[in-house]
Amino acid sequence: MTSVAQHELRPEAAWRPASHRQAPPGGKVAFIGANNPETARMVRDVQSATGVEFIGYFDNDPNKKGRTFCGLPVFGGFDDLLRCDRAAFGLVNLITRDTSTRHQTTRFFADNGFSAADFIHPSINLDGVTLGRGVYLQEGVIVQGGVVLGDNVCVNSGATISHETSLGTSCFVAPGATLAGLVTLAAGVLIGAGAVVLPRLSLGIGTIVGAGAVITKDTTERSIMAGVPATAKGKAPDDEAFLPLFLGKT
């Protein structure tokens, strides 16, 4: 039997220490979307751990402009955002209602010269994890070694992303979901609350997985999956929502 060096058996990405993350412009962050009070707890913990200053929100609901949400001001909508200095702060996209809207919103501010900032709870172990830009990870998320998270990915509380899984641009994983190892999600995949994707499966662009579903086979692009085991219930609209998105270097 031929002996194999340890470094040939374990990919370096699976165990290396977490890399230093680029600070947002001016050391400040503003949010897109003033809706989830969990943001306030995240702000406290992230600011304490990193020193980043969180300055407020941009939200297109005119009834929110000039008010405060969770202790931070709402500056206005996208028209107000476009009048701001691009070098003054980075932006975190808090929109999670669907991956198409999330992706298009981030494209809007990136195409207009704003930088995407991360919003990652400091309790999360990121050793061995490769991160894109604009990643949003809530408290209680487990991300194992060898995982790759693309630009604009959001993973909600209590979800587990098991070893060597890859999430493409603008994927969203809802609370309590499990990706059970060596799973590949293409751009814009939405995994519903409590859903499970079994190991070594690949889900096509824009696939939507319903809450509590168990995925036991690969899916084609834009599949809508539900049930245990999950079966296809239709196709999501093909609106070219997930065109390439470039948010800069890690």
Image (tube, rainbow, N blue to C red):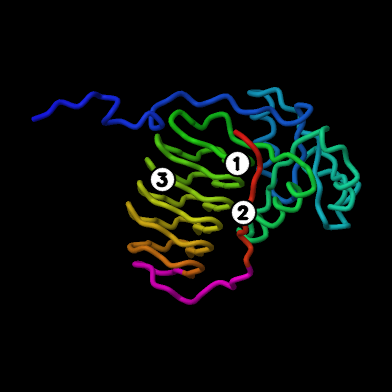
3D distance between C-alphas at marks 3 and 1: 15 Å
- From the top left corner, tell me how far across and down residue 50 is, in percent: 66, 24
Q: Secondary structure at mark 2?
A: loop
Of all residues, the one furthest to the left in this rendering is 1
- Residue at 59 percent of width and 71 percent of height: 238
Q: Secondary structure at mark 1?
A: loop
- Above or below — where is 139 with respect to 225? above
> Which of marks 3 and 2 precedes in the sequence?
3
For label 1, the crowd category at 10 Å Cα-Cα, with few meaning under 14, some 14 to 19 and many 20 or more, is many
Residue receiving disc 1: 135
Task: Out of 120 and 23, give the one closest to the viewer.
Answer: 23
Whether label 3 touches label 1, CB < 8 Å? no
Amino acid, disc 1 = Val
Q: Quadrant of the C terminus?
A: top right
Amino acid, disc 2 = Pro
- Residue at 51 percent of width and 32 percent of height: 124
Q: Secondary structure at mark 3?
A: loop
- In the rendered image, residue 9 lying in the magenta stretch gets the answer no
Amino acid, disc 3 = Thr
3D distance between C-alphas at marks 2 and 1: 16 Å
Which of label 2 and label 1 is nearer to you?
2
- In the rendered image, residue 237 lying in the magenta stretch gets the answer yes
- From the top left corner, tell me how far across and down residue 113 is, in percent: 78, 43
Which range of residues does the magenta coloring cover? 225-239
Is 28 left or right of 214, judged from the image as shown?
right
Which labelled disc corresponds to residue 38? none
Residue receiving disc 3: 165
For label 3, the crowd category at 10 Å Cα-Cα, with few meaning under 14, some 14 to 19 and many 20 or more, is many
- Residue at 82 percent of width and 56 percent of height: 60
Residue receiving disc 2: 244
> Which of marks 1 and 2 precedes in the sequence?
1
